[in-house]
Amino acid sequence: MEYFVERGGYAAHFSALGGCALTLSHLATGASLLRYEGEEKRAADPLLYGVPVLFPPNRIRGGEFVFEGRKYSFPVNEPSTGCHIHGALYALPFSAEYTACGVRFCFRAETGEYLGFPHAFTFEREFSLGEDGLTEKTTVCNRSPSAMPLMLAYHTTFRIPFLPNTGKEEYRVRFAAEREQVRGADFLPTDEWRRDGRVRALGLGELPADRPLSALMEGRGEVRIEHGSGLAVSYAADPSFRYRMLYAREGLFVAEPQTCAIDCFHRSLPPERLGLLRLPQGSARTFLTKISLTR
């Protein structure tokens, strides 16, 4: 089922499948910020349209890890690397209701129902529209009797170009990046980080928006996709999101806020040092992101 909201000079379109924002338009400028080309194309490649949620995000080596002495196993859904990747929440139905400012989506799972995950949990995505754009408030509640590992990201996919009658060569991307994680041919990380990697070599956190790219950057804050006119898409995330997975190809740019480093359980550092969050029994944690058109 689909939902539509117009408020504060913006219009947005949502789907209960994945509890996802699909489109975001700025009415005065005609800007269309999120990539969306209809449900048929989204069904064929759901991770590259709108704001799909990744729970857990990115690759987990062998689909397995140990947390507080307990073994967790997710299905290997990327045979080429032998990994589990991105969870399945983005493709599952949420319940939904309109709110005063937008839409609230909710997914509820009992122990083992979600990919064998041994925790009962509730996952809520609430989207609000206003003059400052689209705000998402995601709340995860652990309803199980033991602490739960929490890893979260969004595969947020922007349109390039996002303004009518403009070309992709007119756009640049800027972001705060401290260092880049080195990954192997299987896309899994090594323990090496570099401050002079490919992305920073392109201009210290600035690059053409149409430059092919796949890189995990350590750094909090805002990602901006800027047009030569001075208008820019701003994508801000709260400090829980320590990393940005950046991905670009023809016509799109993914600025993925991610709470933890890729495959944080199989590294030389403890996973908590790499962003793993611990959600105690009976507790909840809320995450905030915002997309807006600014100057």
Image (cartoon, grey):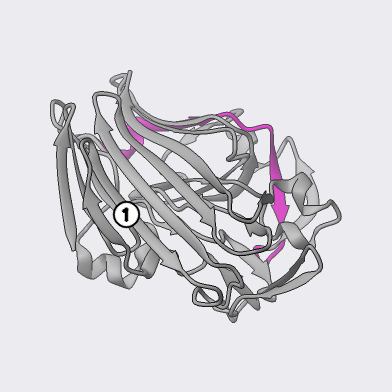
Looking at this rendering, what residue extends furthest in the right direction? 268
- Residue 161 is covered by the magenta coloring: no
How many numbered tags mark residues here?
1
Taking 66 as reference, is 74 left or right?
Answer: left
Q: Residue 70 is drawn in which quadrant?
A: bottom right
Q: Can residue 100 be seen by looking at this rendering?
A: yes
Task: Specify the quadrant that holds the N terminus.
Answer: bottom left
Which residue shows up at 53% across the image and 33% down it?
238
Which residue shows up at 29% across the image and 71% down it?
43
- Placement of 121 over or under 78, stated as above or below: above
Task: Specify the quadrant that holds the C terminus.
Answer: top left
Mark 1 crowdedness (10 Å alpha carbons): few <14, some 14-19, many ≥20: many
Q: Nearer the viewer, residue 46 or 287?
A: 287
Taking 112 as reference, is 281 left or right?
Answer: right
Magenta residues, start to end: 166-187
Q: What's the amino acid at mark 1?
A: Phe
- Residue 167 is covered by the magenta coloring: yes
- Placement of 16 over or under 234, stated as above or below: below
- Placement of 15 over or under 43, stated as above or below: above
Which residue shows up at 84% across the image and 51% down it?
269
Q: Nearer the viewer, residue 218 or 66?
A: 66
Which residue shows up at 38% across the image and 41% down it?
136
The location of residue 239, given as percent across then percent down, is 59, 33
According to the picture, the residue beneath numbered tag 1 turns out to be 105
The location of residue 38, given as percent across then percent down, is 19, 61
Q: Can residue 158 be seen by looking at this rendering?
A: no
Say which element carries label 1.
strand
Q: Nearer the viewer, residue 59 or 98?
A: 98
The location of residue 22, given as percent across then percent down, is 26, 52
The location of residue 294, given as percent across then percent down, is 32, 22
Taking 245 as reference, is 8 left or right?
Answer: left
